[in-house]
Image: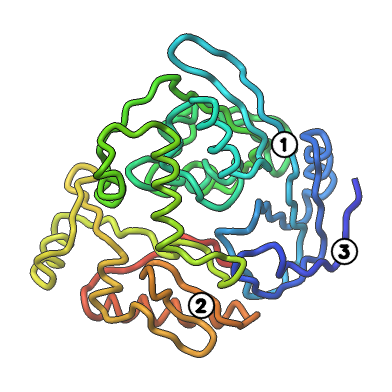
Amino acid sequence: MKILQNIQLLPYNSFRTKAVAKLFAAPETTAELSDILQSYNDNEILIIGKGNDLFFTKDFEGLVIKPEIKGIRVLNETTDHVDIEAGAAEDWDEFVQFCVEKGFSGIENLSLIPGTVGASPVQNIGAYGAEVGNVISVVHTLDKETGAPKIFNNAECGFGYRNSVFKRTCKYVITSVVFRLEKSFKYIEKYADLNHELQNNPTPDLDQVREAVIRIRQRKLPDTATLPNAGSFFKNPVLSEDEKLALLRILPEAPMFVVGDQKYKTSAAYLIDKAGLKGKREGMVGIFEGHSLVIVNYGTENGLDIVRFMNGVQKSVYDLFGVRLEPEVWIY
């Protein structure tokens, strides 16, 4: 397996910021990946997929690994469900399309989310009332330090809101993911925007739900190819009972959703809107006019410019509403 040196990382992050990786590898098999992890375990290691949820602020002095492990196969099939395994490097939206075309339901609401299959459990990606953790049964990994295989069942993944054991520990490299999907489908209203998009079609099929999600996302979100971004930049804040009441005293109409025992999720986009920041721009960085959760890059190659803008948004929201916004993206 060839290890490359001094590789420019601008093409490997959707914000298009410059940084140089001291070492870089793109293994195509699990065996190659294991060999690299064992041979270079004295280096700092960063695993990337398509780079849609990260950006760089400085050179990376270790080894960047971009696994290219692909393949889709059905492991088990009954009259009700199917267990389907996809390699970590498979394009996420192409995998969703494959499943929808086969009539397998469970991930159609996650259409057009950028990235790879391997990244989906890390962030526990979610959209329009669905989270990928609800349909993942097994995640195959390698230990980052030893290269040894380790298999996680759903409970062991520790899925939470935009979170997982893989994100919390950064100790494992995902090689493939097994999903349990249904072979029947009935649309259930979960999310207002999607319900509105389908208001003239009360009984949509899988294809129609996927098409509706794609239309919404294309209207709201900029194409990273023309306007570099990382999608939703901030997590929706989760508040305690006291924090919820404090926010409602300032913003009585702030949306609130129960997510646990005396835990409430509110909308980061709503807070950014109310802070008057939608469409705000400073230099080459700004908030997209079509969606307040999306920070966009208008031309800088310096990741620190994005960090400075992020800090300003966080400060404005906290000063006005007492709520701390946490980035959903990875910053290196």
- The quadrant holding residue 249 is bottom left
How packed mark 1 is, by other alpha carbons closer than 10 Å (few <14, some 14-19, many 20 or more), is some
Left or right, 152 with respect to 22, comes to left
Q: In the image shown, does 194 or 39 lie closer to the viewer? A: 194
Q: CA distance from mark 1 to mark 2?
A: 33 Å
Left or right, 286 with respect to 9, comes to left
Residue drawn at point x = 50 percent, y = 41 percent = 165
Q: Position of residue 314 (x, y in %)?
A: 36, 75
SS class, disc 3 = strand
Task: Single out the mark in the foreground, 1 or 2.
Answer: 1
- Which residue is tagged 1? 70
SS class, disc 1 = loop
Residue drawn at point x = 28 percent, y = 75 percent = 318
- Which amino acid type corresponds to the residue marked 1 in the rendered image? Lys
Left or right, 307 with respect to 126, comes to right
First-in-chain label (1 vs 3): 3
Circles 2 and 3, Cβ within 8 Å, touching? The answer is: no
Q: CA distance from mark 1 to mark 3?
A: 24 Å
- The quadrant holding residue 210 is top left
How packed mark 3 is, by other alpha carbons closer than 10 Å (few <14, some 14-19, many 20 or more), is few
- Which amino acid type corresponds to the residue marked 2 in the rendered image? Val
SS class, disc 2 = helix
Task: Classify 202 as above or below 8.
Answer: above
Task: Classify 287 as above or below 149.
Answer: below
Q: Residue at the far bottom: name it.
A: 283
Residue drawn at point x = 20 percent, y = 50 percent = 257
- Which residue is tagged 3? 5
- Look at the image and tell me whether residue 153 can be seen: no
Task: Classify 4 as above or below 286.
Answer: above
